[in-house]
Image (cartoon, grey):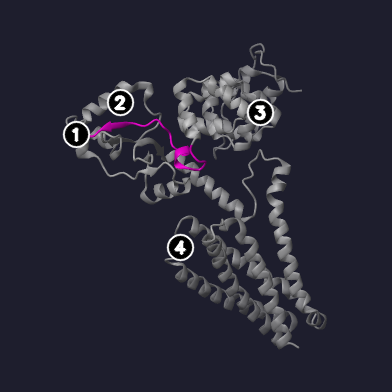
């Protein structure tokens, strides 16, 4: 029986709490998770706080993923406000929504004030409308306005991603002026910043000075003489474009500008790492025809995300079976065709998946576009041709050893060659076509590529068998 009462129990007598919660791979140990579960079952809040207070917020978020919903409800009540604040942005979306329902709005409002505006906005976005209104009304006007402004930008845009806290200085300031200003700001400084953005009288960024260069320069040196060019990000740019700019130009931070070119915030590399991981995770899941399924996903949500593409796959599989149905005479006359037929389709499917994975990743990283599509397509056709010759020869040898039928060996060898070339073409052309149609190639491509390789595999093998063997 789990005790969710908020009244503190008597002080715990267990003084030998082990804070070695992580193993050598930085993974929470089963023993530590068991201690947390036992403390939650006993309603021992003081022990829970002792166990958790020294953990990194990312490890607390990881712990939440190992706990049941009932245990999370207890644990979250005993997290110190500062640790709760830093843990919330680290949680999986589904778990965070559940946790937020358990936190009183006054405690949540206090926790959000500890976060940068971008992280606070990400948390507030997951709140129900009535809870969001209560939390925002309990926050200071400045913090509330910053969050509401961030939520006013489109989801997945630079405006939603940026933090409004930024360090800027006019270009007529010297290094000494800037250092003195930074020292005088205290708690008003951004929690994390790497550059001083130099702005003109209209608050438009004209350059940037890395902190490392600022500290190495003489105090009398004007900022205008040591500033470097910047890569400004438009507030409405998609987060994927922002991640691409950071990756291409090796940025640590970048200023964000509004439609008039004025400085409104900054994006730092820690946010971009999260975006890159998120996009890669989405691409991997979409290649399998599923959505982003975290540890907190429910059964019906998972079913709802997977079943549409299984239905589409069912339709393509039936189509491939109809192709087989056109060759019943050949199958009745030569039973061993049915034995070898799945091999041709399977090899073609694997080859198509290889080409598809490379194409989707190249499109995502912008390494594949109309400028080099023909060259990449030609390369994949040659790869399919060479692979087809190699695998077809090996399979023909196996068929000859197995059935001692030279013509059968020739048939299956040619069928594999044809299917592997078709697989290379499909694995490249399908995602390119979907991308040109403004459709996500990672979502629909696998179904269509499998359909093509199965159909071509069956059609080529059984068609050639009808011509060569009968």
Q: Kindly indicate the quadrant of the structure image that contains residue 59.
A: top right
Mark closer to the chain start, 1 or 2: 2
Tell me the mark number nearer the camera, choosing from 2 and 4: 4
Residue located beneath label 2 in the image = 182
Q: Secondary structure at mark 3?
A: helix
Could you tell me which residue is drawn at 55 percent across and 40 percent down?
Answer: 25
Q: Which mark is residue 222?
A: 1
Residue 271 visible here: yes
Kindly report which numbered mark, 1 or 3, lies closer to the viewer in this rendering.
1
Q: Are marks 1 and 2 in contact (CB under 8 Å)?
A: no
Q: Is residue 178 above or below residue 260?
A: above
Q: Secondary structure at mark 1?
A: loop
- The residue sitting at the front extreme is 260
Q: Residues within 10 Å of mark 3 (few under 14, many from 20)?
A: many
Disc 4 from disc 1: Cα separation: 44 Å
Q: Which residue bears the numbered disc 4?
A: 369
Q: Residue furthest top?
A: 10
Q: Earlier in the sequence, mark 4 or mark 3?
A: 3
Q: Earlier in the sequence, mark 1 or mark 3?
A: 3
**Alpha-carbon span between mark 1 and mark 2:** 16 Å
Residue 18: percent from left, percent from top: 59, 25
Segment colored magenta: 153-172
Marks 3/2: CA–CA distance: 40 Å
Task: Identify the residue at image location x=52%, y=23%.
Answer: 111
């Amino acid at each position: 029986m789990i005790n969710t009462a908020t009244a503190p129990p008597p002080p715990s007598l267990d003084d030998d709490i082990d804070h070695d919660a992580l193993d050598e791979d930085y993974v929470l140990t089963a023993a530590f998770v068991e201690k947390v579960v036992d403390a939650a079952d006993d309603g021992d809040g003081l022990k829970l706080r002792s166990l958790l207070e020294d953990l990194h917020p990312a490890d607390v978020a990881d712990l939440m993923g190992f706990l049941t919903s009932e245990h999370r409800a207890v644990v979250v009540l005993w997290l110190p406000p500062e640790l709760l604040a830093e843990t919330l942005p680290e949680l999986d979306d589904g778990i965070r929504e559940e946790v937020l329902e358990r936190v009183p709005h006054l405690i949540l409002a206090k926790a959000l004030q500890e976060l940068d505006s971008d992280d606070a906005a990400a948390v507030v976005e997951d709140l129900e409308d009535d809870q969001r209104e209560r939390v925002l009304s309990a926050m200071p006007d400045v913090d509330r306005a910053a969050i509401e402004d961030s939520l006013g930008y489109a989801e997945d845009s630079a405006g939603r991603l940026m933090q409004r806290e930024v360090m800027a200085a006019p270009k007529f300031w010297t290094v000494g002026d800037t250092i003195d200003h930074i020292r005088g700001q205290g708690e008003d400084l951004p929690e994390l910043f790497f550059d001083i953005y130099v702005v003109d009288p209209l608050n438009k960024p004209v350059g940037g000075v890395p902190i490392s260069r600022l500290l190495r320069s003489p105090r009398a040196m004007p900022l205008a003489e040591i500033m470097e060019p910047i890569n400004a990000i438009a507030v409405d740019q998609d987060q994927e474009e922002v991640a691409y700019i950071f990756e291409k130009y090796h940025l640590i931070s970048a200023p964000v500008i509004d439609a008039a070119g004025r400085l409104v915030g900054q994006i730092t590399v820690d946010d971009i790492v999260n975006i890159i991981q998120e996009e890669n995770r989405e691409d991997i899941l979409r290649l399998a025809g599923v959505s982003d399924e975290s540890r907190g996903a429910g059964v019906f949500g998972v079913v709802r995300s997977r079943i549409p593409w299984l239905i589409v796959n069912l339709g393509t599989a039936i189509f491939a079976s109809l192709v087989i149905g056109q060759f019943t005479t050949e199958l009745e006359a030569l039973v061993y065709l049915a034995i070898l037929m799945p091999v041709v389709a399977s090899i073609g499917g694997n080859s198509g998946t290889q080409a598809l994975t490379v194409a989707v990743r190249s499109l995502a990283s912008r390494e594949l576009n109309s400028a080099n599509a023909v060259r990449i397509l030609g390369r994949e056709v040659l790869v399919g041709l060479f692979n087809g010759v190699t695998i077809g020869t090996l399979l023909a040898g196996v068929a000859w050893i197995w059935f001692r039928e030279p013509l059968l060996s020739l048939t299956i060898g040619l069928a594999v060659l044809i299917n592997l070339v078709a697989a290379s073409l499909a694995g490249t052309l399908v995602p390119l076509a979907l991308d040109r149609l403004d459709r996500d190639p990672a979502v629909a491509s696998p179904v269509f590529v499998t359909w093509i390789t199965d159909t071509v595999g069956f059609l080529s093998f059984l068609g050639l068998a009808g011509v060569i063997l009968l």
